[in-house]
Image (cartoon, grey):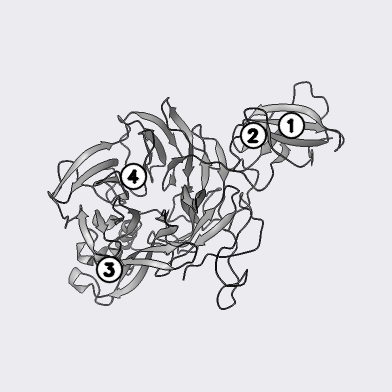
Amino acid sequence: MIRIDLGSSAAAAGGLSLLIVLGGAQPAGTRPGGRSAPAAPVSAPAGDGSAAPRFDVRRLRPGTAPGLLFTTPQLSGPPTDGGGAQAPAQSPMQAQAQALAQASPKAPAAVNGPHGPEILDEHGRPVWFHPVPDGQFATDLRVQRYRGRDVLTWWQGTVTTRGGGIGTGYVADENYRVIATVRGTTAPADLHEFRITPRGTALVTGYRTVPADLSSLGGAKDGKVEDSVVEEIDIATGRTLMSWSALAHVPPADSDAPPFMYGEQPFDYFHVNSVSEDTDGNLLISGRHLSTVFKVDRRTGRILWRLGGRRTSFPLGAGVRFNWQHDATPAGRDTVKIFDNGANQLLEGYESRVAWIRVDPARRTTRLVRQITHPAHVSSTHEGSAQDLPNGNTSVSWGAAGRISEFSRSGALLFDATLPQGWTSYRLYRQAWTGRPAEPPTVSVRDGSVHAVWNGATGVARWRILAGDARDDLKPYARAGWNGLDTAVRPPSRAGAAPRYLKAEALDASGRVLGTSAVTPNTEAS
């Protein structure tokens, strides 16, 4: 069962400081059966913040929406075995099957460099970074509402060779303290979706392997199928309110991916990669390997209609057809917004887009309302997302292409940024967020500059450095505008000998002190 784990306070690296227990009658720090409760999400050493992944901002024009950018930059690499080890060598046919199965996203092998959930501003400057260990992966960082307040949520865990995830959904408060965790029941919580509803429940995806006779499809009689699962979980109690199985409603014969291409791997015929609530409260579920979006009655699990694929419920109007999609979400009544990859690992190079599609079930018609493509004709074989912003703009993650963008309502490119070659961000959100880290700022000296770090603090406009040769006699020494979570402050040109002690004060735009570091010895003082 999923549990919300109550726990004692525990310091954690990467800006996460405390795990708080919510919930039932279990003693703090235990699970049923007497097992220890899990700690806060595993973090790699936080370091000084200077190693946070960097986006190269290539375009920033007036008219972008307010808010920060929420990303999960990762280095895409060869498949792993789900525990960080590289998968064994395969035949060419198996390798092709592996590529097709890895529809979202590529499993990272030992990642070279810090990676994990990251908040940044539109100039590409990191605000918060939570590094995760090699062999782990993080996705779907965003701001959601839980119990009447804004919270920060993301998924973290390991990735299987088939592109699924085994992990946990985390809910953190404005102090970056984890207040709830969500795990799957029918199947482990998967990397593709962790969506909180207004009712305090979480919609999560998962995968489970079941035996299946695939001989009629050219596969093995004693084969295996990867069943896609959608669950709705009450976060406060851990109770499963709804569980939907693709296999119970959609036969493997409907897939665009033939089972023989998977070799001995389970046949991932559906590959769920998003679930959201439609305007009428029913569910929109994306099945990538069928190039289909399903509308599902959340009460009965019955499929109300299919959009796209070989068994679409309606004729597809001009420009409506999509392939290998991600992130199907409602965009008003009877309108679905889709990140249409148009490509996969075996069909590379086809242009990706964001498409708004109008569905009229009564008239049995579909119509392309509008679409957005990138001026550089970007193609993303896997991953990707699109978000409608309050000012009418659209933010887009181009997934495997390692690019994030924002477009005006008319389709003009206002913001564009890239990651280094080989890096991706599964999704992108632009949202308002106020972060108040539980830990104070830190100050240090590296290569002759004073570095002020406050991981996750928002509203910092500038830093004031106090210095002196006695802990209790510090005077103003240097100032600098905030320039990311690790801001370098140059010493004054006529500073003389380096001071023995330093203290950093974070100031807002009006000069009010938001936070103060401890008095810290200057390691470069003679």
Residue 324 against residue 269 in the figure, above or below: above
The Cα–Cα distance between marks 3 and 2, rounded to whole angstroms, is 52 Å
Find the distance from the CA under tag 3 to the CA under tag 4: 28 Å
Residue on which the image places disc 4:
380
Q: Mark 4, mark 2: which one is toward the viewer?
A: 2
Give the mark nearer the N terminus: 4 vs 2.
4
Question: Left or right of 394: which side holds 17?
Answer: right
- Image quarter where the C terminus lies is top right
User: Considering the numbered disc 2 on the image, is that residue within a helix, a strand or a loop?
Assistant: strand
Whichever of labels 3 and 1 marks the residue nearer the N terminus, that label is: 3
Q: Secondary structure at mark 1?
A: strand
Q: Residues within 10 Å of mark 2 (few under 14, many from 20)?
A: many
406 versus 221 height, above or below: above
In three-dimensional space, the C-alpha distance between marks 4 and 2, rounded to whole angstroms, equals 34 Å
Quarter of the figure with residue 179: bottom right
* CA separation in Å, label 2 and label 1: 11 Å
Circle 3 sits on which residue?
247
Marks 3 and 1, how far apart in space? 61 Å
**Would you call the spot at circle 3 few (<14 residues within 10 Å), some (14-19), or many (20 or more)?**
some
The reply to whether dot 4 and dot 1 touch (C-beta < 8 Å) is: no
- 10 or 361: nearer the viewer: 361
Q: Of tags 3 and 4, which is closer to the observer?
A: 3
Asked which secondary structure carries label 4, the reply is loop
- Give the Cα separation between the discs numbered 4 and 1: 45 Å
Q: Are marks 4 and 2 in contact (CB under 8 Å)?
A: no
In the foreground, 281 or 326: 281
Q: Which residue is mark 2?
A: 487
Q: Amino acid at mark 1?
A: Ile
Q: Position of residue 359 (x, y in %)?
A: 20, 47
Question: Looking at the picture, how far across and down is residue 317, in whole percent?
Answer: 14, 44
Which amino acid, by three-letter code, is at mark 2? Thr
Residue holding disc 1: 465
